[in-house]
Amino acid sequence: MAATGGDVNIVLVHGAWSDGSGWIKVIPILQAAGYNVVAVQNQMASLPDDAANTRAVIDAMQGPTVVAGHSYGGAVITSAAYGAQNVKALVYIAAFAPDEGEALGGFPQAPGDKFIAPGPGGLLYMDRTKFPEYFAGDLPVSEAAALASVQRPVNSAIFGNKMGAPAWKTIKSWYQVSDRDQMIPPELERKFASRADATTISLPTSHASLLSRPKDVAELILGAAKS
């Protein structure tokens, strides 16, 4: 029998230059379907720290749990969900899904990478003037500009941290490819999806698909939850 909303938790993990509010359009759809939804807030100081913080949230869930990650959040869930007995599915939204020994800095670069540079405190920021075009090109410019203003910077260490044992080798996965992504190459996203043997959809979207196509993203997560 397929699980119902009341039986399953959904944990959402944000990516770099964002925070948990990036799921703000997806969350109401999942909640309306009856699911208990929690969006993690990570510091993005290191992959191990963010994975540990996310794992603490996962371990606090009572019952089967779906864990979804956007962008860098995909690396976080790949680490955090490994060995978690309550995680029934992983969902990657235009996200990294590294294998053991891989680091984010070792993957092919995307066009938006050249607009990332150290800012206050030495943390990495994305150029606010380029953010709307390269991160969120299919959102209204005013909305994308607001996201650029509230972006959460990251420590460069996250790009050098190597992945341990990946959860997608033991947990069934779903993946959404963003065909117009300029932050992660779409062909790299397809590679991640293929080697994880993930149930995959492609959307003609920017990297910010969870904001530009929230219904489609939510439907993918719901499909994993109902499986």
Image (cartoon, rainbow, N blue to C red):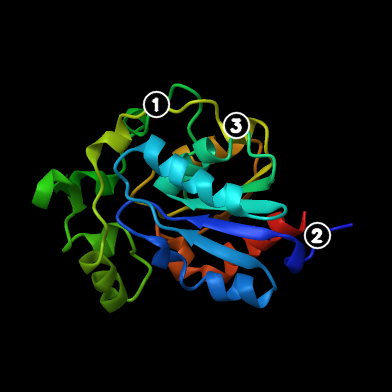
Position of 1 relative to 100 (above/below): below
Query: What is the spatial separation of the Cα atoms under label 3 and label 1, in whole angstroms?
Result: 18 Å
Q: Secondary structure at mark 1?
A: loop
Q: Secondary structure at mark 3?
A: helix
Residue type at mark 2 is Ala
Residue 162: name its quadrant.
top left
Badge 2 crowding class, 10 Å Cα cut-off, few under 14, some 14 to 19, many 20 or more, is few
Badge 1 crowding class, 10 Å Cα cut-off, few under 14, some 14 to 19, many 20 or more, is some
Residue 12 is left or right of residue 168, and the answer is: left
Q: Which mark is residue 195?
A: 3
Query: Which residue is label 2 attached to?
Result: 3
Q: Secondary structure at mark 2?
A: loop
Whichever of labels 1 and 2 marks the residue nearer the N terminus, that label is 2
Residue type at mark 3 is Arg
Residue type at mark 1 is Lys
Query: Which residue is label 1 attached to?
Result: 162
Give the quadrant of the N terminus. Answer: bottom right
